[in-house]
Amino acid sequence: MTGPTVVVVGAGPAGTRAVEVLVRAGLRPVWIDEAPANGGRIYQRPVAGTTRSSRDLYGTEAAKAESIHAGGERLYAACDWRPGTLAWNIRPGMLDTFHAGRHEAVAFDRAILCTGAMERIVPVPGWTLPGVFTLGAAQIALKAQGVAIGSRVAFIGTGPLLWLTAAQYLKAGATVALVLDTTPLRTKARAAAGLFADPVTFAKGLALVARLRLAGVRVLEGGVPVAFEGTDAVEAVRVRDRRGREQRIACDAVGLGFGLKPESQLADLAGVPFRFDAIERNWIPERDSAGRTPVQGVYLAGDGAGIGGADAAELAGARAAWAVLEDAGVASDAAEIARLDRALARLPHVRAALERAFPYPSALAARVPDATIVCRCEAITAGELRAAARARHVTGGAAEVNRAKAFTRIGMGRCQGRVCGPPAAEILADALGCDIAAVGRLRGQPPVKPIPILAEAAE
C-alpha cells in the first residue's frame, strides 16, 4: 500500500512492537538500530555460538526476550532493516545516519523515536579506575559476550537493575562481594503499597533479594560508597553502613548505577520541549499518551520518552505506531487502540512507586568531594563546578548547567553530558542553593554520539 514514509529508531521492545504494527498495516518502515539484531539492552542478544540458554541469560524474562527476538526475525524482510546504524542527528523530515563508515540522510514523513535509556551515576572517588563499570555495561558483558567484569564483583547503587544484575552475576558463577543499595529499607517499605499494583514484578524483585541473601552475599541497605581504591585497577571499595561504620571490602570489579534516565538527545534535536519530572528527577520530553509530541511528525515511545520498563515500552511502541496510522488517515483498529490505552493508563502509578522506592540519591551526588572527577571526558572536578557557581556572584557566571559548561567544559567531551549531566546539575544546584529544576539540563547537539570526523568531512 502507499502511505507515509515512517522511520523507527531503536529495535528494543518499543521499536519492535512499533514496526510490527506498521508492517501489519501494509507499510514498509525504515528500521534503524546500532546493534546487529533487535532486542535492545534489556534483551541484548549473545554472540553467535553461545551455549547459555535464554533462561540463563534472561531469567524470568526469557519468554518475553524470545518473543521480541522472534518478532524481529519475522520483520526484517518486511521493512527496510538497517542494523549497525547510528542515527546521530535529526532535522525536519530528515534523519542523519552513520553506517559502515558512511553517512546517509534518510528522509521521513513521520519518525518514531524509541531510543531507550541509560544509567545515572554518582561520581565516587576512584570511580574512573579500570574495573569500575556501569550496571548496564556489566549486563552487556554478561549477556552479549558471556563474560563477567570480574571474578569478585561489588555492586553499588540503587534500583531494580542493581539487584537484578547482582543476581545474574551470582547465577553465572561470579563471586558477589557486596550489594550496597543507597536506599534505606524503610524507604522501600513505605513505597511497598504502590508496588503491589504490579504484584508479579514485585514478587520477582523480592525473589532476587532473597536469592542473594540466601547465598550469603553481604548486603547493605541505606549504605554510602566512600571511595574505590586501587592503583592500576580497582582493588577494594570503602563503604559506610547506615550506622556510620566504615568497611573496606576487597573486589576486582564494581558495577555502579543509580536508576535510569531517558536517552532523549534526538527528541531534543527535533525540537521537542522538555519538562522536569520531580518524581523521576529527570527531564522528560513532552508527548501525549499515544506518543505524539508537539513537533509534527515526531513520536516517542519506550524509555526514551520517560522511564517505564520493557513491558511498558512494548505497549507504548505499538500505541505510537497506531498514532502514526491514525494521523496518516490509515484505517486503524479502535478496539486494539482502546486496549493499549487502558493498559498504558495503569502504568504511571507503578512507575511512581518504583521511583519512590529507589530514589536517585541526590544529596550524595550534590556532596561529591571537591577533588572527585565528575566529567571524565574533560577531567572536570566537583570543586571546579562549585568554583564556577561561586563566580556567579562576581562575574554573573554559572547560574545554570549550560553556563557551567561554558565556564568549565563539563559535558563538552565524548559523552556530551549523558553521564556527568545529572550529577553536575545536583552539584550546581546545591552550590547555588536553588532547586534542581532551576539549573536546567545540558542541551543536546549533533552528533549525539561520536562519529569519525573524516566520514563527515567527506560528505
Image (tube, helix red, strand yellow):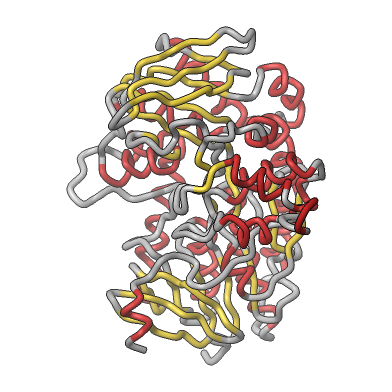
**Quick check: can you spot residue 314?**
no
Q: 428 or 452: nearer the eye?
A: 428
Image vertical order of residue 401 relative to residue 102, above or below: above
Give residue 429's position: percent from left, percent from top: 74, 44
Q: Is 271 left or right of 236, judged from the image as shown?
A: right
Give residue 366's position: percent from left, percent from top: 67, 36
Q: Is 206 left or right of 70, judged from the image as shown?
A: right
Q: Residue furthest front?
A: 394
Q: Quadrant of the C terminus?
A: bottom left
Identify which residue is drawn at 69% across, 31% down.
363
Give residue 238's position: percent from left, percent from top: 47, 18
Q: 292 or 75: nearer the eye?
A: 292
Identify which residue is drawn at 77% across, 44% down.
432
Q: 268 or 311: nearer the eye?
A: 268
Image vertical order of residue 337 relative to residue 231, above or below: below
Image vertical order of residue 104 relative to residue 393, above or below: below
Identify which residue is drawn at 42% across, 60% down.
71
Identify which residue is drawn at 48% across, 57% down.
415
Q: Quadrant of residue 254?
A: top left
Q: 4 or 217: nearer the eye?
A: 217
